[in-house]
Amino acid sequence: MATAQHSLRISEARLRRHYFGGERAVIILALAAVLGVIFLVFGTLFLKVERRDDRALTKGQVTDKYRRSEAQKTPEGETQLNYVYWLRYRYKDAASQTHEGKDTIDFADWDKLQKGDELTIEYQPTDPEKSKAAAERSSAGRRVAIFCLILGTLVCAVTGVLGTSRWLAAYARVRRIREGIAVAGEIIERLPRPFFRFGDLVQYRLHYHFTDLAGARRTGKTPWLPRDVACRYAGGDPILVLCSPTAPWRHEADVFQVRTDGTV
């Protein structure tokens, strides 16, 4: 059986945007999606840095550690001593050839290492004599990359799910407004949202009751509405309710007053 189509005062696309949450909801979801993409980009870049194809990793052994002071001039013309921390190490390449090398590292890593300790060495496969001490920097960078990738994926996934669910809900509400049969309803109360109250950005939900086409008394509630829409109504005010002719438990209050065929 065909369902009657009723005319609306505004286009369905505009009404769906109203139920979706307006420009504010679009901006918030877009910013969240951009943030998720940024995390994914940074995570990918960090991971690429950690997976450099021109480097090979092997285990080496510390043979010596020392520090050297370097005198530097400050902007005020004073001489300041800075320490550079060195490690000497021995390692084997993929062909089991032994090599020796040295590198500077941060004091935190230098202070933890002693002669005979094992550490990770990066070297060039085409020139195994060229190497550097990787210490724990590679694993730390990998952890940062994985964290960024996981967080970016979660943010993008949650944003996508929220956006899709809000759009589907808006589509269903517009369909009920367009195809429903108008009956008279009455506002019971207007309740503010208990959380996310930032000045004038508070949202409200309207509770209402009505008598459906079969004579049964029913109650309902609207989605969270912006202040300027919800404050048009107060307890006891009339409101148009659109009921499904085949499923009376499916109904929608015409809070945006877009139906042209019903008055209350």
Image (spheres, rainbow, N blue to C red):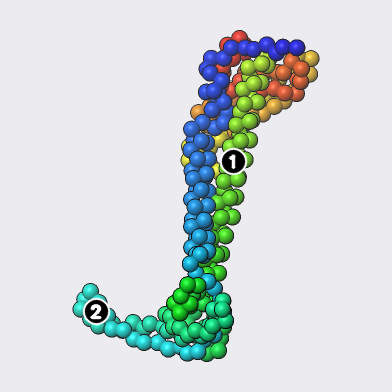
To which quarter of the image does residue 173 belong?
Answer: top right
Within-10-Å neighbours for mark 1: few <14, some 14–19, many 20+: some
Say whether residue 3 is left or right of residue 97: right
**Picture coordinates of residue 167, whole percent (x, y):** 60, 31
Residue beneath the point at 55% across and 65% down: 142
Element class at badge 2: strand
According to the picture, the residue beneath numbered tag 2 turns out to be 73
Q: The disc labelled 2 sits on which kind of residue?
A: Lys
Give the camera-side residue of 143 and 176: 143
Q: Quadrant of the N terminus?
A: top right
Residue to which mark 1 is pinned: 160
Q: Position of residue 261 (x, y in %)?
A: 61, 9
Asked whether 92 or 156 is in front, the reply is 92
Q: Does any portion of residue 42 appear in the rendered image?
A: yes
Amino acid type for the residue under numbered disc 1: Gly
Quadrant of the snapshot with the C terminus? top right
